[in-house]
Amino acid sequence: MRHYSAIVAGCGGLGAAALYRLSRRLGPGVLGIERFGIGHDRGASGDHSRIIRLAQHEPQYGALAPAAYMAWREAEEASGQRILTLTGGLVIEDRAHRDKPGTGNRNLDGYAAVLSEAGVAYEELDAAALRDRWPQFRLDGDERAIYQRDSGIVDARRATAVHAALARANGAELLEHTPVRSLRPRPDGVEVRTDTETYLADRVVVAADAWTNELLDGCGAHLPLTVTQEQVTYYATAHLRDFAPDRFPVFMWHGAHNFYGFPVYGEVATKLGQHMGGPEVTAQTRTFAPDPVRQERYRAFLDAHVPGFAGPELYTKTCLYTIPPDQNFVLGTLPEEPRVAVAVGAGHAFKFAALIGAILADLALDGATSHPIDAFALTRPALTDRTFARAFHA
């Protein structure tokens, strides 16, 4: 049985970052095992782009956001690759629809409070000021917005590839197209079984997202996770200059539905998605077929509020969210098996992936981290109290 100082099970966005950070501290003796291939589109980390932002609605995320930027810059410096593209970012609140039953529950006051507490500069804009600055928007007059200049795009596909390459340069090994079938603690380590071989690790990081409970079963652990199928659409806009990254920011729109959008990046196209609201699935039952109801919803929103953003649909991609009942990350070691560290991104972790990799390395090697992650512990009521009511914000 081959022995490793650390094994990472699942090398998507979070796992590849953990593999890199472990390899920085341990050098050779680190193994990453990926069920599919680096950059695959079957989980949560595929595609070209994710929003990165200091503008957070909850303090537990605001406390991590500056360190996430630093971690991405470290990866850029180590690799010579550009991962972040700053565009500025808008959070737009459509007050005419915000409080209707079944709509999103995010408002600007929460963002402003977290930004102010952290001392992060931002601008507040009414509808007229927003329209004057970005005439690409068509507004009704009830909207207001926050603009934060440091928001932008993290290149998800490039970032995962960069972390994997940096890990290999440090001596880590990486097995692709190799599902981990089980973990089994034993006195001398944690046994990691695949279809063809069994390995022994001093410590294991599980970053398997929708496959998390499948791996934790052998450790006697089970997390209350919901998996949903979400989707984004790329549009071949004819107005490329108007929606270039230097002229149009990433944005989030909180109204009857919560949308998020990107300027032209990764494809010669704009990109729109809706946060949450997709059907519940499993890793085995999910499909890759777009939901036509959501495609029409996206088109109606763009026709009403950002008409030049739209164009012929280039394609629609699906992805998976894996969500605890309180919709917060899972970051910690198993209470009954501290040699196993676990990360679940809750559908919104990629912006923090470089930092989460460092946190997972800390947890695996030291049992603790200096970063504030108490809100994400495996011992919190959302994960241990079976009566905890699921509370997903839209």
Image (spheres, grey):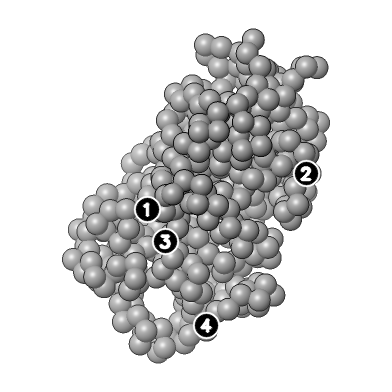
Identify residue for label 1.
232
- Image point (31%, 49%), residue name: 316
Question: Sequence-wise, which precedes: disc 2 or disc 3?
Answer: 3
Which residue is outermost to the bottom?
128
Under mark 1, the amino acid is Val
Identify residue for label 3.
85
CB atoms of marks 4 and 1 within 8 Å: no
Comparing labels 1 and 3, the label whose residue is closer to the camera: 3
Give how far apart the Cα atoms at labels 2 and 3 are.
32 Å
Residue 346, position as x, y percentages in the image: 58, 48
Question: Sequence-wise, which precedes: disc 1 or disc 2?
Answer: 1
Give how far apart the Cα atoms at labels 4 and 1 are.
28 Å
Query: Total of numbered circles in the picture?
Result: 4
Give how far apart the Cα atoms at labels 4 and 3 are.
20 Å
Under mark 3, the amino acid is Thr
- Image point (36%, 39%), residue name: 288
- Image point (55%, 28%), residue name: 171
**Left or right of 375, for residue 115:** left
Q: How crowded is mark 4: few (under 14 residues within 10 Å), some or many (20 or more)?
A: few
Which quarter of the rendered picture does the N terminus lie within? top right
Give how far apart the Cα atoms at labels 1 and 2 are.
36 Å
Question: Sequence-wise, which precedes: disc 4 or disc 3?
Answer: 3
Give how far apart the Cα atoms at labels 1 and 3 are.
20 Å
The answer to whether residue 286 shows anywhere in this view is no
Identify residue for label 2.
368
Comparing labels 1 and 2, the label whose residue is closer to the camera: 2
Comparing labels 4 and 3, the label whose residue is closer to the camera: 3
Identify residue for label 4.
123
Q: In this view, does 31 lie above or below 230?
A: above
